[in-house]
Image (cartoon, grey):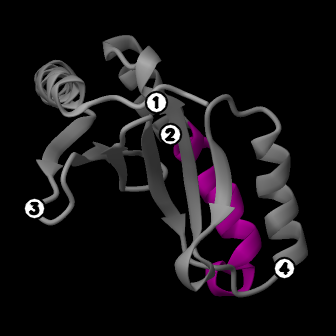
Amino acid sequence: MSEVHGEAELAALEVAIDSWLAQAQADNPVLAAVDRDAEVPMRWYARLRGEEKDFTTVWLTLGQRTLRYETYVMPAPEENHERFYEHLLRRNDSLVGAHFSIGAEDAVFLRGELPVAVLDAAELDRVLGTLYATVERCFRPALGIGFESRLR
């Protein structure tokens, strides 16, 4: 079982995440905004400007063992369900540290988590970059399959 981190260790990681995200926002114009969740402790929202999808918001949630990350990709498809989910499952095969999943109301999310023990600025950068690049690469093709009639 992975190590459970105490309050002091988590507080230090919380400060480190705040610092890294502030620096990333200052350095990278794609990172439009970073906010903290007022109701959920140790949760951040990183809003990224996209080209294929206007914005991608990544939620980062720090727990005692892992940093969980996720982004909403799109609502459930209206049609071509089998082809739509096959497309996403085939994309899952090439992803490292993230996967497509079905969430509330059958919406599509991209999620993952990593152990707190490996959490550093480089890993946070990799996480945001992976989710951003995956959404940018997969959004339009998935939209075209799942909402084909509407987009004609």
Q: Which residue is mark 2?
A: 131
Task: Name the mark nearer the viewer: 1 or 4.
Answer: 1
Figure check: 145 above or below 13 = below
Question: Which structural element holds mark 4?
Answer: loop
Label 2 – label 1 distance at C-alpha: 6 Å
Q: Which residue is mark 4?
A: 80
**Which amino acid, by three-letter code, is at mark 1?**
Val
For the residue pair 16 and 130, the one nearer the viewer reads as 16
Contact, CB < 8 Å: mark 2 with mark 1? yes
Label 4 – label 2 distance at C-alpha: 24 Å
Question: Which structural element holds mark 3?
Answer: loop
Label 2 – label 3 distance at C-alpha: 24 Å
Residue 127, which numbered label?
A: 1
Q: Which residue is mark 3?
A: 38
Assign the magenta stretch its main secondary structure: helix
**Which amino acid, by three-letter code, is at mark 3?**
Ala
Task: Name the mark nearer the viewer: 4 or 2.
Answer: 2
Figure check: 143 above or below 117 = below
Task: Name the mark nearer the viewer: 2 or 3.
Answer: 3
Q: Is residue 59 left or right of residue 82?
A: left
**In the rendered structure, which disc, 2 or 3, sits on the residue that comes first in sequence?**
3
